[in-house]
Amino acid sequence: MIFAWYHRQYIAMKSCLILILLFIPGLLFSQFRQGTSPQKKMSVFHADALWFKADGDSLPFIDVYATIPYESLQFIPEKQGFSASISISLSVRDTTGKKIAEQSMDRKIFAETYEQSRGANAEFHHVQFRVPAGFGYHTCFVNVHDAVANTDIREIRTLTIPIWSKQEKEHRYVFSSIMYASAIEEKQGGKIVITPHLSNNVASLLDGFFLYVELYHVGAPKDEIIGISYRITDEQQQEVFLKSVPITYSSGRAESQHLYIPVKQMPILRTGNYMMTIMAHTMKQDSIDKELTRISRTLTIEKTISGIVYQDLKKAIRQLRFIATQAEIDHINEGEDEETKRMLFEEYWKGIDPNPSTSRNEAFEEYYGRIDYANKNFRSYTDGWMTDMGMVYIIFGQPFQVERTPRGSDGRTFSRWIYQNQRQFTFVDNSGFEDFRLTTPFPTGIKYRYSGTQ
């Protein structure tokens, strides 16, 4: 079995797992700068630590994955393009705090174009470490050093490897770690292609996702029928979702079973923290009987741009006014129910995805990122996206320069936004309550265009 970027062999099951890692992009702007453009800094990467074991009596091992998006790195120009240099290190400590493993690697990353170095193609660099481990609690420290920017960022992951033994009949089943995956697809020749999601935050996986987990069994009765269930509970440990599917094991099979559990009907979860638990249990008349083992992992719904948009689809459709025609908005609203409208809304954005071959839709992220920024910075008597400053910002983006006059004797304040193409907009606040109104005639028929195509 091939897992991610390394080879892992099993005696009983020779399939292939290719992991294509995803990441959640950050917001476009952290603050509004006068006369400058946003600067890049080492701000995000994603890491995950999972434990597995091979068939037989071998000890378990820990696999640590990390993905570093190009947009997080500082690139410098070279003759053939642009380059970045990073050092990635891993340190693993056991239950007592003793260091049991330490690995590091240096990588030089090349980008052919400036746009590619800025993350326009949603590219990333991925690394994987494997370390042998014992039973018990482990802490994994992953550090990425950007040599050009001279910045560091660290991710810490913890996991517990349970003890199992053939002599303990009560522990004849044990789960590996849980992996979240956005897609699982079987290819010719028995290859299984997995697109993992290296984050507990699944807010972006609007169409559902998969749970990948391995179940190890020793000394299990022949043809024992057991059930596999998964449960989602909230922070008050209240159950919000439960699903169960029976499967059959045979004592003649390998000691490990690979489970791909679809979570395709996600309940509507509010922003917050949850617990995803997978359970193995005996079945009695198609119902859950005795629990055999379980494994849990945190699941979160965070307010990413995608999460904010889909919390209020009706408003998100109204906010299309700066990019879509009225006919296109009416077409989406003609959907007979909420699900149909969501499908039409997604189809609209797929039609203007600047890079449809990637998992990201940069235009969607930029557009609603601007709306989010407008709401936080230009709110007056109405939401920021509905103000004149909000409209100009959403359509044209960040101005190259901002000039603001002190409040005059008449109580008015003027603000002028200047763009690099010589376009200018002047706003006036007549009330003193930051209610800036546009005084410059606004060009007719101008709509938002993704900045990468302007």
Image: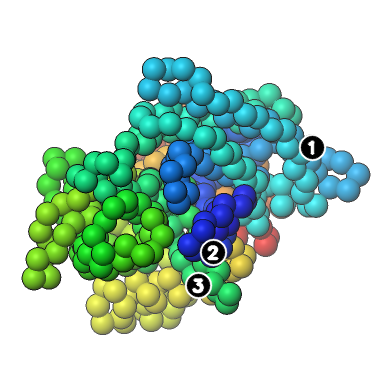
Q: Is residue 366 left or right of residue 244?
A: right
Q: Quadrant of the N terminus?
A: bottom right
Whether label 2 touches label 1, CB < 8 Å: no
Whether label 3 touches label 1, CB < 8 Å: no
To which residue does mark 2 refer? 14
Whether residue 164 is visible here, answered yes or no, is yes
Instruction: Where is residue 177? Give x, y as percent.
Output: 38, 46
Q: Quadrant of the C terminus?
A: bottom right
The disc, 2 or 1, on the residue closer to the chain's N-terminal end is 2
Disc 3 packing (10 Å; few <14; some 14–19; many ≥20): few
Please tell me how many numbered marks the rendered image carries.
3
Residue kind at label 2, given as amino acid type: Lys
Task: Give the SS element for disc 2.
Answer: loop
Q: Residue at x 46, y 66 (%)?
A: 184
The disc, 3 or 1, on the residue closer to the chain's N-terminal end is 1
Task: Give the SS element for disc 1.
Answer: strand
The disc, 2 or 3, on the residue closer to the chain's N-terminal end is 2
To which residue does mark 1 refer? 76
Q: Mark 2 to mark 1: distance in Å?
A: 43 Å
Whether residue 361 is visible here, answered yes or no, is no
Residue kind at label 3, given as amino acid type: Glu
To which residue does mark 3 refer? 186
Q: Residue at x 72, y 52 (%)?
A: 115
Instruction: Where is residue 22? Give x, y as percent.
Output: 52, 53
Q: Residue at x 68, y 24 (%)?
A: 150
Q: Disc 3 vs disc 1: which is toward the camera?
A: 3
Q: Residue furthest toward the right?
A: 79
Task: Give the number of the disc on residue 216.
Answer: none
Front residue of this view, candidates 305 and 174: 174
Q: Quarter of the image holding residue 237? A: top left
